[in-house]
Amino acid sequence: MATAKKPETKETAVKKSAAAAKKATAKPEAKAAAKKATAKPEAKAAAKKATAKPEAKTAAKKTTAKSEAKKAEPVKKTAAKKAEVAKKTAAKKAEPAKKTAAKSTAKKAKSSVPKLDFDKELFKRSVLYNVKTLYRKTMEEATDQQIFQAVSYAIKDQIVDHWLKTQEAYEKQDPKTVYYLSMEFLMGRALGNSMINLTAYNDVKDALEELGVDINVIEDQEPDAALGNGGLGRLAACFLDSLATLGYSAYGCGIRYRYGMFKQEIRDGYQVEVPDNWLAEGNPFELRRPEYTKEVRFGGYVSCRTDEHGRNNYYQEGYQAVKAVPYDLPIVGYGNGIVNTLRIWDAQPVDCFRLDSFDKGDYQKAVEQENLARNIVEVLYPNDNHIAGKELRLKQQYFFVSASVQEAVAKYMRNHDDIKKLYEKVTFQLNDTHPTVAVAELMRILMDEHYLTWDEAWEVTTKTCAYTNHTIMSEALEKWPIDLFSRLLPRVYQIIEEINRRFEAEIRSKYPGNEEKVKKMAILYDGKVKMAHLAIAAGYSVNGVARLHTEILKNQELRDFYEMYPWKFNNKTNGITQRRFLLHGNPLLADWVTQKVGDGWITDLPKIAALKKYAKNEKAQEEFMKIKYQNKLRLAKYIKEHNGIDVDPNSIFDVQVKRLHEYKRQLLNILHVMYLYNQLKEHPTMEFYPRTFIFGAKAAAGYRNAKLTIKLINSVADVINNDKFINGKIKVVFIENYCVSNAEIIFAAADVSEQISTASKEASGTGNMKFMLNGALTLGTMDGANVEIVEEVGKDNAFIFGLSSDEVINYENNGGYNPMDIYKSDADIHMVLNQLINGTYSPDDPERFRHLYNSLLNTESTSRADTYFILKDFKSYAEAQKNVEKAYRNRSKWAQSAILNVASSGKFTSDRTIQEYVDDIWHLDKVVL
Ligand code: NBG
């Protein structure tokens, strides 16, 4: 428990501050060296001596004396600061659910997970020193943000030592490396996660407490690294965590967007997008690596020259270039000392912009190059499962892919001499089609820069690249107009033309006379470059992300490709890291699990199955429910602070948090809330268990129906939350700015996990797994990974409803569903839909929700009314919701199911997923330190 600063502690801290200040030299360059030196025993002794030195004491006294000079400005701040810390600490005490529990987890005598050394005193000195040298301040004067920076640099110091050792081990052992190429890495905050994985969370917490600082306040200073939209980007982040924890050599390769995912503000019920300037205060964890700068070329033309050996060599000329400068972020493995790297590329102009030396033509070119560099990494496209098709997006893709592939090849060639064996040491995983241009870029590098023949280059490429498909949504499948593509990437396009020519020949030889097949499967067709086809033709592996999804790929979406290359297809059901989503996000539950079954689950989640024997134990059930209650209090407090809404922690917390998309059917959820409200108004005395419906979702800025759904949710919330008549039985809350950091709080507090996508549309879902791990019961369709969740936990411990994927696909292919029939025949649905257009929730503008109404009943706005079968599934959803209520009334039974959910979540760790990628696709070598 955090405590306010005690006078003795403070004095010690001040002394140490002086000592550290004394010891370390004043020069910034010397800082790191000085701190490293302190790690050695001799240096530690020296540091102690320094503390005892008279000058240091004087310095300390001076500070103390200054503090006592009550009129001085800093003192006021000190007092204010102390009061603030005390206040925050008191508040924390009153609201006990925050991150306290991991403590006993770590202190357990019989721990089966490793613990790294952590020098608490060194860390404290390092923090004080950083506050001083970075800000010329004392702890008392520093702001929370400044202390966050100081703490982060101190943690980074510790990480860097492990980072160096890991690199050394990699150099020596020369393991095969996976390069995970991804437009998105939704990392969230780094500090908390790094402390957890350094197994130092509690040491740091104690150290900070001794410095008078509350660790939670400090963690809250860090902006999320929101370099991703949703599940796809978060999956990449979980994978990096698992790769490091399992001891595999891996690079995440992406873009250092200057603006990450927009911040969402809700104004008057509408989403407003606010730029996310996440680098405004600087990023203490990143390391700029200008020595690995690469040049990336756009545009121009290709010329061919024959060399003295009679070989045709191709050159891109008249191009524009940008410099790709990498920034490295450390990815700390759990307790094993491994630190991998997330390498994100920044863009810079090739030539410094020198006015004097340019004639008019060059001036123009210089400005263009400067602009290209500035624009290219400016912003993450805020689309999920949808492709914008913008030229800049293609530039982004080629930019980071080219730089990453160039560096991977260069790194390989630093220690090997045979480029033809690249695939023995390097593999590229293409995270969706976004980085597929890697295939052609690798061909280009192998042929144009390493002089391999086509066949040699093709053999290397097809043994090096593998592709993951993350969606069957057609609007997300990337197809680039050929004119745009060939203008921007002339040489790469030439190579793709040749790949296509050979691929078509292969299809023709396999299916003679079947020109339909050729058309359907070609990479270049109808003026488009089809990236998925390119990825499959050139990749050695194609995987889906849940069993059902992979089956749909094989039998529907990619059937022709599966027929041609059955051996390439495989399934890798997604997973999540339990270290962020339980150990860090839900310390109370983490601690409880550890008390019951030991801490092996932290690195071996299936061990959590041992909890099953407690599911029927009444005492355990009560303990579980109390923890859930504490977590609900924590979320209630967050909601009060952020939304100003009071919610009842005794009500059922029914949660749907994920990107806003029609296929995810937030609309079904809110229509059902409207229906329940109608019921309550009509039958005021009916049995009803109080329920809090919690939503959190960002909508792509240009996605009209998604944004309108947010407005609808907020409008319904306004009406229902303020209706005294229903006595608070229903509350509706839309949590602003859903992101990784508040997600951790939300999952921990959920009773019900809404996973209600139209069957067949959600490739996997990963939120479903995070809820399960935190003991929420799934209310969902048989879609994505829900299928496997239910398989693990049993149908009795989930609420399943709705059409099956086969039924959906059947309606889609053969018709036979008319939502108007349901509208006409079902009075409840009729009423709810009419309320969309009669002003019940928009008295100032009854037409406001007309588009939503139309999307369900008219073909005006979509090709087929109710594309996502909302009305079709409505009754069965309402029925399942009734069952939820019934089940919740039996507290003991509910607790049993919730515990069984936690206990059955073992399969859904990303450690398992990564091990499967390693065994079946990447074949990496395990590294030991
Ligand atoms: C998303 C799917 C999710 C899936 C994640 C991670 C895209 C293109 N796809 O269902 O919609 O869980 O990928 O695989 O963002």
Image (cartoon, rainbow, N blue to C red):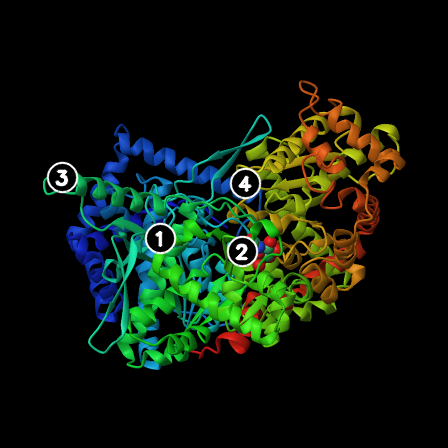
From the viewer's perspective, is residue 369 above or below residue 760?
Answer: above
From mark 2 to mark 4, how far is it between C-alphas? 15 Å
* Residue at numbered disc 4: 700
Residue 835, given in percent of the width and then of the height, sits at 77, 27
Callout 3 amino acid: Leu
Q: Nearer the viewer, mark 4 or mark 1?
A: 4
Which comes before the other along the chain, label 2 or label 4? 2
| Between discs 2 and 3, the one toward the N terminus | 2
Kind of element beneath mark 4: loop
Q: Nearer the viewer, mark 1 or mark 2?
A: 2
**Looking at the image, is 329 positioned above or below residue 460?**
above
Pointer 2 and pointer 4: residues touching (CB < 8 Å)? no
Residues under labels 1 and 2: Cα distance? 27 Å
Q: Which mark is residue 451?
A: none
Classify mark 1 as within 8 Å of ligand 1 or not, answering yes or no: no
Q: Which residue is mark 2?
A: 232
Q: Secondary structure at mark 1?
A: helix
Identified by mark 2, the residue type is Leu
